[in-house]
C-alpha cells in the first residue's frame, strides 16, 4: 500500500516519456493531490503536516475523520433544511414524494427534508383578479372575449372583472392544472362560460339597463358552482361589470332607442303626476255633490212631510171653524208676502189726508233683500210724500210713499 505512494527512482523517471511534460501538458499526479489534501486535513484538526515523501499511517485516519466530519455537517444542514415558517393568513401543504400529507397553520414547522418531503405555501387572504373582455384597461378591448349574444339575437360588448381568493389549500394545490399555478386560466374559463350563458338567457334591454346588477349576481353564483364542481378550492368574492354597451357599429341606433325609452318614462311619470292631481280633486268634488244631493233630498223630504203635516192639521182646524181658519190663513199669507216687499200700505180712514213721515231707510233695512240696501245707497229717498188715495174694488184706500 505504502509502496505505491513512494516516488519513483530516477531510472523510472528517465524511462517515462511524459515525465518532463507533466507540469504543462500531462495529466495531474493523483498521489500529489491526495498528499496535499491529507496535509490540509491535518492542519485543520491541529496536526503537523508530514513531508510529501514520508506518508504515515495516521494520514489515512485523518482522511477518514475529515470525511466523516464533512458528512456530519452535510447531514445537519440537510436535517435543518426541513424547518420552514408559515406567515399569518397563509397555509402550507406538505407533500411526501408528491403525495398529500397534511396542511399546517401559521408558525414554525418541520418536515422531512427534500427529496422525501416538500411543502408549498398558499396565500389565503390574497385577492386575485381575472379580466374578461379587456386587458389591463377598459380601453384595451379584447373582442373575442367581449362580444356576447343575447336571447333576442342581439350582440352586446361586455367587460367584467372576477375577484377570487383561496378557501381550501389542498384542493387549490392539487386541482389547479393551469400554466401559472394560480388558478387564473381556470377561473377565466369558468367566468367566460358563465357570463355567456347568463347573457344568452336575457334580452338586450335587460342586460344594458336595469339588469346589470342581476347579471353580476347570477354570474358570481354560477362561476362558484363550476369551481366547486371541479374541486378547485377557489372562492369567488365578487364580479364587477365594468362596461356593457352595444357594438360600435350600432351604438347610435341604441342611443336613440334608449332616449326614446327615457322619454316614454318621462311622459308616463308626468301623466301619473297629472292623474294624481286631478283624480283626488274629481273624487272630492263628486263626494261633495253627493253630500249636497243627500242634504237637498233630506231637506225636501222634511219640508214635504212638514207641509203635509201642517196641511193635515189645518184641514182639521178648518173643519171645526172654517171662517176663522180662512182669515188666519189670509193674514199669514199676506204677512209672508208683504214682509219681503218695500211697499207701505196706509189706511185712508185713519190717515185723514195728513202728511206722513215714513223712515223708508229703516223699512228697507228691515225688509232684508240686499238689493234694497244697494238701492238705498244709490237712489235718493224722499220721505213724507203721500200720493192721492186710490180706490180698489173693496173700497180700501192705498197710498204709496217713496
Image (cartoon, rainbow, N blue to C red):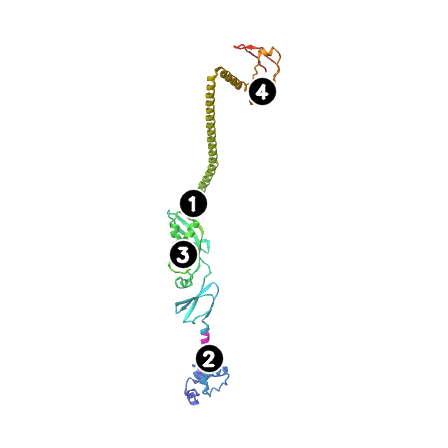
Q: CA distance from mark 2 to mark 4?
A: 145 Å
Q: Rounded to the nearest whole Å, what is the CA distance between mark 1 and mark 2?
A: 82 Å
Occupied quadrant, residue 228: bottom left
Tell me the residue that label 1 is attached to: 254
Foreground tag (2 vs 3): 3
> Mark 4 falls on what kind of element?
helix
Q: Position of residue 274 (x, y in %)?
A: 47, 37
Q: Check the image and name the residue furthest to the front.
A: 320
Q: Is residue 69 magenta?
A: yes
In x, y percent, where is residue 164? Answer: 44, 58
Q: Earlier in the sequence, mark 2 or mark 3?
A: 2
Q: Secondary structure at mark 2?
A: helix
Earlier along the polypeptide chain: callout 3 or callout 1? 3
Task: Provide the secondary structure element on which disc 1 rests.
Answer: helix
Foreground of the two, 33 or 323: 323
Q: Residue at x 46, y 19 (%)?
A: 316
- The label shown at residue 69 is 2
Mark number for residue 364? 4
Quadrant placement of the C terminus: top right
- Residue wearing tag 3: 224
Mark earlier in primary sequence (4, 1): 1
- Magenta stretch: give its range: 64-77
Q: Work out whether residue 276 can be spotted.
A: yes
Amino acid at each position: 500500500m505504502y509502496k505505491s505512494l513512494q516516488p519513483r527512482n530516477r531510472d523510472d523517471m528517465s524511462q517515462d516519456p511524459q515525465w518532463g511534460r507533466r507540469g504543462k501538458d500531462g495529466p495531474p499526479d493523483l498521489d500529489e493531490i491526495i498528499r496535499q489534501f491529507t496535509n490540509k486535513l491535518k492542519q485543520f484538526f491541529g496536526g503537523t503536516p508530514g513531508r510529501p515523501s514520508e506518508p504515515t499511517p495516521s494520514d489515512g485516519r485523518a482522511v477518514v475523520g475529515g470525511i466523516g466530519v464533512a458528512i456530519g455537517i452535510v447531514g445537519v444542514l440537510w436535517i435543518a433544511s426541513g424547518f420552514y415558517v408559515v406567515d399569518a393568513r397563509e397555509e402550507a401543504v406538505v407533500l411526501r414524494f408528491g403525495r398529500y400529507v397534511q396542511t399546517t397553520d401559521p408558525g414554525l414547522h418541520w418536515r422531512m427534508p427534500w427529496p422525501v418531503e416538500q411543502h408549498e405555501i398558499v396565500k389565503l387572504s390574497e385577492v386575485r383578479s381575472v379580466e374578461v373582455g379587456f386587458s389591463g384597461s377598459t380601453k384595451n378591448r379584447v373582442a373575442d372575449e367581449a362580444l356576447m349574444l343575447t336571447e333576442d339575437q342581439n350582440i352586446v360588448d361586455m367587460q367584467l372583472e372576477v375577484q377570487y381568493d383561496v378557501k381550501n389549500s389542498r384542493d387549490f394545490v392539487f386541482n389547479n392544472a393551469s400554466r401559472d399555478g394560480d388558478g387564473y386560466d381556470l377561473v377565466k374559463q369558468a367566468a367566460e362560460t358563465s357570463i355567456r350563458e347568463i347573457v344568452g338567457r336575457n334580452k338586450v334591454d335587460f342586460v344594458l339597463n336595469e339588469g346589470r346588477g342581476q347579471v353580476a349576481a347570477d354570474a358570481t353564483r354560477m362561476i362558484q358552482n363550476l369551481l366547486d364542481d371541479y374541486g378547485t378550492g377557489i372562492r369567488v368574492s365578487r364580479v364587477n361589470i365594468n362596461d356593457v354597451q352595444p357594438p360600435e357599429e350600432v351604438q347610435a341606433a341604441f342611443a336613440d332607442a334608449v332616449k326614446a325609452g327615457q322619454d316614454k318614462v318621462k311622459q308616463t311619470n308626468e301623466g301619473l303626476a297629472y292623474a294624481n292631481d286631478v283624480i283626488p280633486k274629481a273624487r272630492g268634488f263628486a263626494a261633495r255633490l253627493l253630500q249636497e244631493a243627500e242634504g237637498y233630498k233630506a231637506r225636501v223630504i222634511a219640508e214635504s212631510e212638514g207641509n203635509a203635516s201642517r196641511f193635515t192639521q189645518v184641514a182639521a182646524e178648518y173643519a171645526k171653524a172654517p171662517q176663522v181658519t180662512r182669515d188666519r190663513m189670509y193674514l199669514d199669507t199676506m204677512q209672508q208676502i208683504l214682509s219681503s216687499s218695500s211697499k207701505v200700505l196706509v189706511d185712508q180712514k185713519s190717515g185723514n189726508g195728513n202728511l206722513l213721515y215714513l223712515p223708508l231707510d229703516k223699512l228697507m233695512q228691515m225688509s232684508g233683500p240686499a238689493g234694497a240696501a244697494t238701492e238705498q245707497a244709490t237712489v235718493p229717498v224722499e220721505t213724507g210724500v203721500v200720493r192721492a188715495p186710490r180706490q180698489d174694488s173693496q173700497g180700501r184706500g192705498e197710498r204709496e210713499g217713496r
